[in-house]
Image (tube, grey):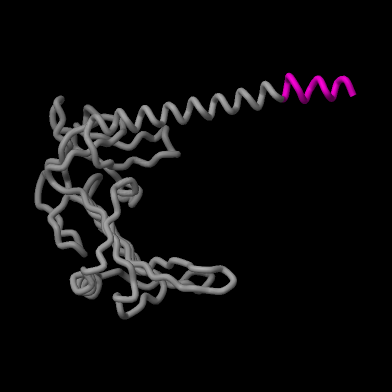
Amino acid sequence: MCGTVRPEGSLLTAPFSGKECVGYHYTVTHRTADRSSGSTTWTDYEGYALAPFAIRSPLGDVRILAEADKELFYELPRKDLGDAYERASAYLETTDFGETITSVLGGKSRTREMVNGPGNFRVDMSIGDPPRDLRSCDLDEKIIRPGEAVYAVGIYSVERSGLLADPNITSTPFHIVRGDEKALRRKTRLRLIGAAVCACISLAVVAFYFLVYVPRNIGG
């Protein structure tokens, strides 16, 4: 499904950039260095939210009925927001992350999830013992903005007038991609080429096995 983003209610405010949007995903991470293992990136905060919206296509408006899952945003471009520390600090200080949960290994985390139905949710997570000074961290944010061209792949429900995740596809989660119909065709073409190359390699391996390896062992 290709088209432009059309909000179906109030907009969200992206927590770090402050931009109006219908969906966002953010992370706060920091890195540690160790001689034996090298550099390691740790996630301190992560969250995502979606407000009701539809994709306006030539066939009409199609609502996005996504479940609360951060994978919805995984193919959107990530923007480094190293200059948004004050706004990020204010957001994190005023956000309720819920009760602390301690794992069997001693790790601590807090998660607060608010779901008002498919396509309308907010999740905020605090992991471990985050650094107090965000200036030692990296800020990243992904957003879905009103009016931008996007496409999504799923199953259309006539009853619910919206696009749902395909339960038969587990390798590729339901997600939003920035771009128009040309971008979708280009991506589909590249995937078909990749699949064809993999098939050719597999056939070559099978042919080598039966034409070279098997006769050599029979002759021996």
14 vs 192, nearest the viewer: 192
Is residue 158 shown above or below 107?
above
- In reply to whether residue 217 is colored magenta, the answer given is yes
Q: At 73% from the left edge and 19% from the top edge, which residue is drawn?
A: 211
Q: Give the image location of residue 168, x and y in percent.
A: 42, 32
Q: Quadrant of residue 64 in the image?
A: top left
190 vs 41, nearest the viewer: 190
User: Would residue 217 appear left or right of 186 to someone viewing this image?
Assistant: right
- Answer yes or no: is residue 123 visible: no
**Image quadrant occupied by the N terminus:** top left
Q: Give the image location of residue 90, x and y in percent.
A: 19, 73
Q: At 39% from the left edge and 31% from the top edge, which residue is drawn?
A: 190
151 vs 126, nearest the viewer: 151
- In reply to whether residue 124 is colored magenta, the answer given is no
Q: Give the image location of residue 52, x and y in percent.
A: 17, 46
Q: Residue furthest bottom?
A: 132
Q: Give the image location of residue 79, x and y in percent.
A: 27, 57
- Answer yes or no: is residue 131 visible: yes
Is residue 64 shown above or below 116?
above
The majority secondary structure of the magenta stretch comes to helix
User: Would residue 133 appear left or right of 4 to someone viewing this image?
Assistant: right
Is residue 175 shown above or below 182?
below
Q: At 29% from the left edge and 65% from the top edge, which residue is drawn?
A: 139
Question: What range of the chain is rendered magenta?
Answer: 209-220
91 vs 122, nearest the viewer: 91
